[in-house]
Amino acid sequence: MESVELAFGGTSGIVVLLAYGGLMLAVGLITFLRNRNIHESLDEYYLGGRGLGVMVLFFTFFATQYSGNTVVGYPPTAYRIGYQYLVSVPFFIMIIAVYLFFAPRLYALGRRFSLLTPVDWIDIRFKSKAVTILAATLMLYALGNYLLEQFVAIGQGVSGLTGGTIPYQVGVVFFIVIMVAYSWLGGMRSVAYTDTIQGIALLFGVFMLLVGSIMYFGGPSAAAEVMRTQAPEKLGAPDTGGLAHWFSLLALVGIGAAVYPHAVQRIFSARSEATLKRSFIRMAYMPFITAGVVFLVGIIGIAAFPGLTTGESEQLVGRIANALALEHPVFYWAMILLFGGVIAAIVSTADSVLLTFSSIVSNDLYGRYVDPQAEEHRKILVGKLVGLVAVVVLVIIAWYPPSTLYQIFVLKFELLIQAAPALVLGLYWSRLNSRAVFIGMLAGTLLASTMTFAGWKPLGVFSGLWGLSLNVAVCVIGSLLVGVSRDEHEHAVEVIGEY
Amino acid sequence: MKRKSKEPVKSPLVWIVFVAVFAAINPWYFPAGSFEPLIWGVPYWAWIILAASLALSVFVTWVVCCQWDMGADEDSSHDPGYSHGHDREEG
């Protein structure tokens, strides 16, 4: 893959990366020193003692949704398909809108039953080993994929920022070691605090990128002139195929990202209902200044660097940053901070994913089936170690990265979304049959995976949505046909009937 | 015992408004390929989509403020049969 050498990177880039790394380690260490009992309780380690306040909760939600990918991967897509990628703004709002249909009850149940992970909820609701293990496996697989994607992005970002001075592999290993260290030291608390720092750095950098792009490349009007003459389809409203793509992105991302295990876990870690509500309101307006700004950078890129091939356009943000850095010293430093912020944001998404991965291992697999009698300290340790093994395996896979990030992004959603019926329908429908849930989840997973590998996309709708449709159909029709046993129904009413 | 609570999912109004706003954020109601007039270099339909997106954000605010009150924090005493670990297996 062709890469753009960043003239401004080199030593300054290395200094900024080392500073970020040091800061994150310091946060982990301080959190550790201030909360010595953190490793004795699953609640403390994985949920920050269920005490996250509005700002920290907001930024940690922010970090689970917006990764460095949003900054590096979205502008190239906007560059290639033009205004039809404006869908990236409403789709981030959709995630929050989708939360409104299940988070209120899930938060209340989380308090009542001390829920730790989404699988925890599925287990309490269905009391079915098969459903619990299948859901846990799907989530671990998707989280692993997600983590892999972040690792590849870290490596590319680091080597890009330093103009290749730090090789891809060194960047990956350096940041993963730091990430594992502060996550182990402070658990959810240090993950959430570093998310806050990383989020602020990213917001600042993205804002400067837009200001610079408009100043030096002329804003959307200049881009519109180029598109009008060279590629009017990038300006035009979508046709039927474009609409199907738009719709399925909204539906897939809205539902998929809302049921992300690490996002659901954040619902449990809110200090109070009021805290959670305030964080959601803030999140609902963020897409305009995050996805919106990033989208605009891609559009401006059309005028700034016309005629790039798909491969070349993947480096669009690097090219723009490079050009800006050469224009003015303020932008030189702002772009270094931006790339530091991008890498920090990738790390902050990865740490959340890793923590949730470990919590599912600690609580849902080891703590439930392998050694239920174990001390919480030991469960945490097992989660950490299995997480570490997963990280090592993923680093080996990430050593020689795949070329584009977008395909992998869709792949993890396709699977994760299959846990949604158990998670959400289970909240409201006491007659949902656990066997139907299991068969639905399995059938949806198989269909979505097969379609993804075969590259089928009937009517332009993503395979994950076809899988989800089958999944929901099996759940609903199966439950209606077979019904539930008296015991099952009574249990469901006991768990959810109060609301 | 049923407790008094307000939950968005139970309100028909929330669903109706959501469906309406969701329909508005999908650009099916523009002629395919049209982009004139451009306002500050941005196609007219993109502005409308942005306005609809803002409506979705306002919808979220409205639902959170006015339709969501589960009183979850009033009952912070956790259910004893469902604490972590092996207790739950029997619970």
Image: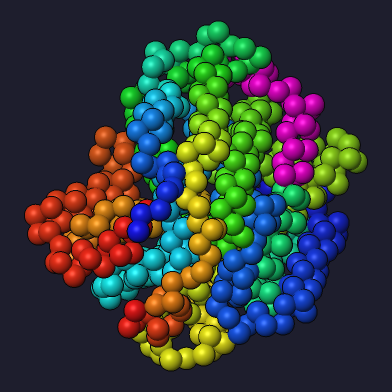
The one nearer the camera, B23 or A208, is B23
Looking at the image, residue A442 lies above or below residue A40: above
Q: Position of residue A360 (x, y in %)?
A: 45, 73
The one nearer the camera, A82 or A439, is A439
Label count reads: 0
- Kindly tell me whether residue A449 is visible in this rendering: no
Stretch of the chain drawn in magenta: A203-228
Q: What residue occupies the far left of the structure in this picture?
A: A481
- Residue at left offset 48%, top offset 70%: B78
Q: What residue occupies the far top of the structure in this picture?
A: B37
Q: Position of residue A464 (x, y in %)?
A: 32, 49
The quarter of the displayed image where residue A21 is located? bottom right
Q: Position of residue A492 (x, y in %)?
A: 27, 63
Apparent side of residue A221 relative to residue A437 in the rendered image (left or right): right
Q: What residue occupies the far right of the structure in this picture?
A: A329
Looking at the image, residue B31 lies above or below residue A294: above
- Secondary structure character of the magenta stretch overall: helix
- Residue at left offset 31%, top offset 58%: A497
